[in-house]
Amino acid sequence: MIRALFLFMTITFLFSCESSVQNKTEKATEEVTVINPNLQEISTDEALIATAVMAAPAEHRAECTVIGYNMAGEFVTMKEGSNELICLADDPKKKGFSAACYHQSLEPFMARGRALKAEGKSATEIFDIREEEVKSGKLSMGETGSTLHIYYGGETMYDPETSIVDGAKYRYVVYMPWATAASTGLPERPIAANHPWIMNPGTHRAHIMISPVADVN
């Protein structure tokens, strides 16, 4: 009787181990990432333009203006557009990928930031200088509600057929100068991914932040 019980327990244990290994193997197989064979490095001006406009809403991409550093390291207008959106291409000299697209009324604010950065100003200095200039009326923040679309990620490979950058995600910034949690009803910290919140409240750079949106299509 004891031998029979021992034999039964041994068989049950072995069967349980085999099932566990099989389940883990099946799960690992399911989790294997399919590598896109079309992926290429973003290494041409054409690729910079194609991936930059991916930051814009799909229906506006064809007519966007694209500016930024080309492969030769020159900051130029890479593509003339006809709508209200300006896209800033990824800087090929920087690690990872980051493109942005914003309403044209934000260009004075964005251009001023680029100029101050080129002068060697720190992020804090740039913030303070633009704060005073916006307060004095010297610098425009554009229309209230002007939006910045950001398409970013750690990789620099893209699919030439779709212009999708491998692993890239979206986040959105809606500028609301001087807005606060009290004036908008928004929290000052994100509650969860994709939930809006207000950043830099009470300043010229107050904005609604939505970050990140996981689907890149």
Image: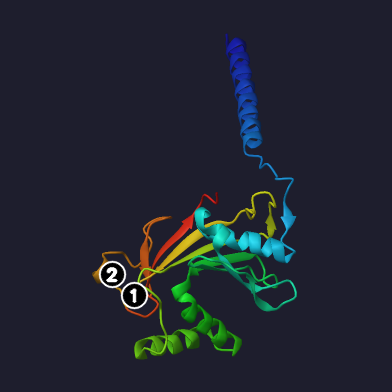
Determine which residue is flagged by label 2: 181
Spot occupied by residue 1 in the image (x, y as percentages of width and height): 57, 8
Q: Earlier in the sequence, mark 1 or mark 2?
A: 2
Q: Could you tell me the amino acid type at mark 1?
A: Pro
Spot occupied by residue 160 in the image (x, y as percentages of width and height): 70, 52
Q: Which structural element holds mark 1? A: loop
Q: Is residue 41 left or right of residue 57?
A: right
Spot occupied by residue 190 in the image (x, y as percentages of width and height): 38, 61
The image shows residue 207, relative to residue 58, as above or below, that is below
Q: Check disc 2: other Cα within 10 Å, few if <14, some if 14-19, many if 20+.
A: some
Nearest the eye: 103 or 204: 103
Q: Residue at x 40, y 55 (%)?
A: 192
Spot occupied by residue 148 in the image (x, y as percentages of width and height): 47, 67
- The residue furthest top is 1
Q: Residue at x 35, y 76 (%)?
A: 177
Mark 1 touching mark 2, by CB under 8 A?
yes
Q: Is residue 181 left or right of residue 23?
A: left
Nearest the eye: 61 or 133: 61
Label tally:
2
Q: Check disc 1: other Cα within 10 Å, few if <14, some if 14-19, many if 20+.
A: many
Q: Which structural element holds mark 2? A: helix
Determine which residue is flagged by label 1: 201
